[in-house]
Image (spheres, rainbow, N blue to C red):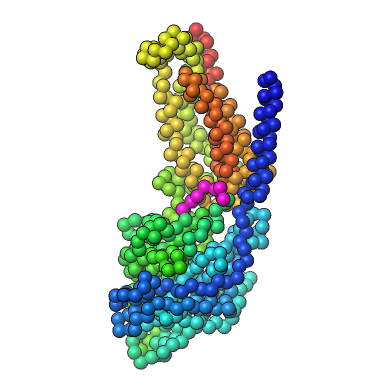
Amino acid sequence: MDIKRSILLVALAVVAYLMVLQWNQDYGQAALPAEASQKQSSPAQLPDTPDAAPNKGAPDDVRAVAGEQQVSAIPESQASAQLIRVRTDVLDVTIDPRGGDIVDLRLPEFPRRQDRPDVPFQLFERSAERIYEAQSGLIGDGPDKASGRPLYSSEQRQYQLTEGQDQLVVDLKFSEDGVSYIKRFTFDRGDYDLSVRYLIDNQSGKPWTGYMFGQLKRDDSGDPSSSTATGTATYLGAALWTKEEPYTKVSMSDMDEKNLKTTVEGGWIAWLQHYFVTAWIPAPDQTNQVQTRKDSQGNYIIGFTGPAIAVAPGSQGETTATLYAGPKSQDQLEELSPGLRLTVDYGILWFIAQPIFWLLQNIHGLLGNWGWSIIALTIVIKLAFFPLSAASYKSMARMRAVSPKMQALKEQFGDDRQKMSQAMMELYKKEKINPMGGCLPILVQMPVFLALYWVLLESVEMRQAPWMFWITDLSIKDPFFILPIIMGLTMFIQQQLNPTPPDPMQAKVMKLLPIIFTFFFLWFPAGLVLYWVVNNCLSIAQQWYITRKIERQTATAA
């Protein structure tokens, strides 16, 4: 009967495994983006002009400069059919001449999926499925008004950073009322940041005053950089820098509740998603007005408005800001602006996660493979906590050694819990056993384990990083679920080395834990599961050695 039951359980396990594999094949892959046609541009929601007259119109009205006619609403502006394409070695950018906004941006160095290296990951998008774009302009006396955006002209429709060329400059030109504008985009080889500079030539007969703004507009669609539909969710939302708080999150729900408006010197505003970030970085020495809002189309906007730019008649003026759109590379982000590296969000344990990432990065510099680097890091962490682990395993080994005596106490006192507890405390005292000795070291190590979890989850270096054999991407789940199964087996083996809990119900629950954890770990990134497998194997070896040593000492003493 036992043999039949075992065969049935094995058969059920095989069927369940095959069903999960088929589900993963059908639904576990990230969907490729659809090639949708350009969507009609929604009304451009420009920021308020500083020191403007109060707005009495609709919520999306743009305040007019004092003395100008108030426009009730921004009309629908058609996206230009003649978009401007700019390609560098790391960026593929599309600019709409209407306003000079970046409406499409792709990253050739980061494929959407590993099995389709020809499909680059798309950050900015203006389509029927998604709205996410970087807008900038000049308000006040500038060409960006509530009545419409300027239509810039360019010498070419296609720009390409050629071999041997380190910098590419794209000029968009517009003239109005005796004032000429050049919106200049500057791209550098190997850089994900680009300069957006306005050159103003005032040949009119009156002074010109304007304000540069930059903003990121996004709808409420999901995170396209999430590994799978069942992956662990990371933060998707806006963030900004202030002197008081160098990293402040502003989620979509926060924008639903109220608009944020604050004044900041320098700093940055950003939109975060898994592995990637986009950020506007104004000049560090200027004072900017930062604000968030939600427009009538349901899009979420975070942006800045710079200080006034005054250009006398017959004079020229300029202003500039930097736009970053790319991976969360901590070294690059820190060079651009203080605090920007914090967009690599390691959570509340960032002060532990940062040194762990530094160590992992340096190990990778020696080994050249992130999988082996994780294994080496696990060994280093295990060695660092060796004394604590040893104390924990010694306590459990002693508990295991005196388990016959505890069983005898249970038979002696039966259901009398009070006498049973007193007898157990006397036994612990006699055998010099600390019942909390196995728990405290684990509690001490837990912050490190949690920090490592976020390092492996949030670091873009893990994205599509191969290890060996079937593990071709450490950032997503094991495609065949072999590592989670191995993890469950190691957990079961480790459990056999622990003393059996005196409570029968607790003992049954402990037996179910390997199965429960195996199920949860099915969806974890392979890099995280690899860490737990290696950690469990090292723990088994350490615990087995200590347990056998304690048992020999106990047998000798007897």
Q: Is residue 513 left or right of residue 354?
A: right
Percent coordinates x, y for residue 481 in the rendering: 63, 40
In front of the other: 390 or 540: 540
Residue at 46% x, 53% y: name it: 235
Looking at the rendered image, the quarter that the N terminus falls into is: top right
Say if residue 336 shows up in the picture. no
Q: Is residue 138 left or right of residue 189?
A: left
In front of the other: 277 or 282: 277
Residue 226, placed above or below residue 35? above
Q: Is residue 117 left or right of residue 425?
A: right
What's drawn in magenta, residue-wise?
Answer: 229-235
As for residue 232 lying within the magenta part, the answer is yes
Residue at 48% x, 24% y: name it: 506
As for residue 325 lying within the magenta part, the answer is no
Answer with the quarter of the image where residue 293 lies.
bottom left
Residue at 70% x, 23% y: name it: 4
View extreme (bottom): residue: 205
Answer with the quarter of the image where residue 125 lies.
bottom right
